[in-house]
Amino acid sequence: MKAFSITAALAAALAASTASSVRAEQVFNRIASFAVADNLPEGADRKAATSAEIIAASEDGRTLVYTDSPGKRIGFIDITDARAPAAGGTVSFEGEPTSVAIAGAKALVAINTRESFTKPSGQLAMVDIATRNVDATCDLGGQPDSVAINKERTLAAIAIENERDEDVNDGKIPQLPAGDLVILSLKDGIADCASIKRVALTGLPEVAGDDPEPEFVAFNGKDEIALTLQENNHIVVIDGKSAAVKTHFSAGTVDLKGIDTKRDGAISFAGEQAGRKREPDAVKWLDDERLVVANEGDYEGGARGFTIFDKTGRILFESGPSFEHAVAAIGHYTEKRSSAKGVEPEGLEAARFGDDNLFFVLSERASVVGVYRDTGADPKLLQLLPSGISPEGAVAIADRNLLATANEVDLIEDGGARSHVMIYERGEGEAAYPQIRSAEKDGLPIGFGALSGLAAIAEKPGFLRAVNDSFFSSQPVIFTIDATQKPALITEALPITRDGAPAQKLDIEGIANDGEGGFWLASEGNSDKLYSHALLHVNEKGEIKQEIALPAELSANEIRFGFEGVTTVGEGEDLTLWMAVQREWKDDEKGFVKLVSYKPATEEWGAVRYRLDKSEEGWVGLSEISVHGDYAYVVERDNLIGAAAKIKKLYRVALADLKPAALGGELPVVKKEEVRDLIPELKALNGYVVDKVEGFTVDAAGSGYIVTDNDGVDDSSGETLFFSIGAIDAM
């Protein structure tokens, strides 16, 4: 048994993916995203939550079928042109679809119709893909979860979970009735309901043996069925034709080291978990003898990675925390799940693309897909693909070089991203994502996320600084970025400290060089969190040497949407700091915000007014300010996401117009000039448009750089977009 060494593997994969096309590297890139809400039936509430959980493809590879459990329907997407997926309609049911598989011209849909946890019930519905008619149903006698079909399309297997009620007895099992496995015969995609065979699983697992809870099912080429019992931490192999249990074994435990185990607002891979139960969710066969499981955990465990077994239970490979480390190295680590199951590998897919046997590991919490090559021995990490929020299912369409993911979370109630199906294509070229990653330090990745302000490093073209915001409340950091590499590389992380300890109660949203090796930082206040609006002066060691509070004329009218950037004009005694206030404060006319000045030598404050663009929805505000040449550049954005996003722009104001007036009086209005609409760049990776364009600066060679804030992967896809917009002086 071997475990991956971490980001060295990722670095090698990224290096390979950006190699010259002369080497004919094959990489996946996202080519389209489809919002499930765009496939709602006529009359449906477009603001109701949707979901895409499990996904399958028609045998010709031109139609995707996904389950939408909250909507009690399945949806169809026409991917004849995979780069332009089109709504294909829906089919509704009385219960909640939990899984779907394709047999010829039919979609076999498992439907949960339970009356209660103690009275589970369900059906298998057979839906004609062409006509969208439900041709037949079979009573399954329990609540189904996963459904799978054998290669010859003659057998269907359905995991009958009869899941536990997490509100009863603190969710502890046993909670009867027990689950089992159902096997049915198929002909032309129609199940023979009279052929049902039930496979009893009681007495097999060591954990709650009288209450097996089947989770995921898969066939190999010998019609053998692999079945995970997630809460029971067990795996069963069944002969599909005879319905006899051939082997079964505990999924076992893992000793995890180098993991983050504290939910404390900081990423620290210094923790350990001994004897961690794997508790696998998805399972896929790699061949007729080996299977891979995703160790999500759902009860008492979760091993943060994946394991390859042979069908007798012998461990052939254990990933340990390597998958999680690779995820952290591209900024997708979800610190809020540290104490539990980390990035939660949940879904799997496996397929042969050309000469490569590949398998795909889906991280529910990190919203990424790991692409691995199955070598027959230790697998090789090839890529990490950005997905929507919480990928639950995936389907490979290998003869079209396509992969599709179903992303279950819909944040419409909070004004966030919708549930999406995302499509990737494999071909020669370079991997478009990630656009930024981190180096190792002491063999572990530099954890990062929630990047906000940017600043250039003087006289070093392509080298920048960045800061993180209050999501990492116990770990404020100044990062060094080498943007001459592709992807850009975070090489250093300098902690911001106060009296020798990590500084608390900060929300760093802006950074500027002080000309002496140190930095000026802008901290956005939030009275709900006891954060104060402030300017900080930090030395080259990251030590806070001065904290400057707002004057009464400002603080009397503050709201939490404060300083979102800081920049400098002049030097020495003439040095002036300029800060962009994100939103209107109490004394501002609607549609106007302040650009605030502060002169350290004289402690003078002043301001000008800046007119915001108008939006029909949401709000508009400023996210950054950065001086280059004769102009101050500001990022102006709405707080909208996806198709609703309209304003993500770079403007500039002539320094000659930045003539601050005294606070408390009439402030002059500056004239702004549009420099660039950033939405085309935000669409370039074929995902949905993210809302938080947070950082901008111009490097020593005059090139502009943009970074987005991924909110620490909290209610976010976790994608950090980092890109150059070219020579600023040419715009």
Image (spheres, helix red, strand yellow):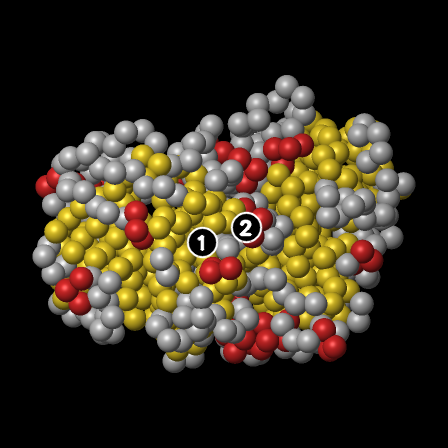
| First of labels 2, 1 by sequence position | 2
* Image location of residue 323, percent across then percent down: 52, 67
**From this viewpoint, which residue is outermost toward the top?**
43
Marks 2,1: beta carbons within 8 A: yes
Instruction: Identify which residue, 254 or 507, lies in the foreground.
Output: 507
Crowd class of label 2 (few under 14; some 14 to 19; many from 20; radius 10 Å): many
Q: Is residue 626 above or below residue 326?
A: above
Secondary element under disc 2, as helix, strand or loop, is: helix
Task: Give the side of residue 538 with respect to residue 653, left or right.
Answer: left
* Image location of residue 259, percent across then percent down: 40, 68
Quadrant position of residue 168: top left
Cα gap from disc 2 to disc 1, whole angstroms:
9 Å
The residue under the point 68% across, 62% down is 28
Type of the residue with mark 2: Leu
The residue under the point 62% across, 39% down is 35
Quarter of the image where the N terminus is located: bottom right
**From this viewpoint, which residue is outermost toward the right?**
188
Q: Is residue 359 above or below residue 51?
A: below
Type of the residue with mark 1: Thr
Residue 49: mark: none
Q: Which residue is mark 2?
A: 682
Secondary element under disc 1, as helix, strand or loop, is: strand
Q: Does any portion of residue 554 appear in the rendered image?
A: yes
* Image location of residue 216, percent across then percent down: 64, 51
Q: Which residue is mark 1?
A: 708
Task: Give the side of residue 295 with respect to residue 456, left or right.
Answer: right
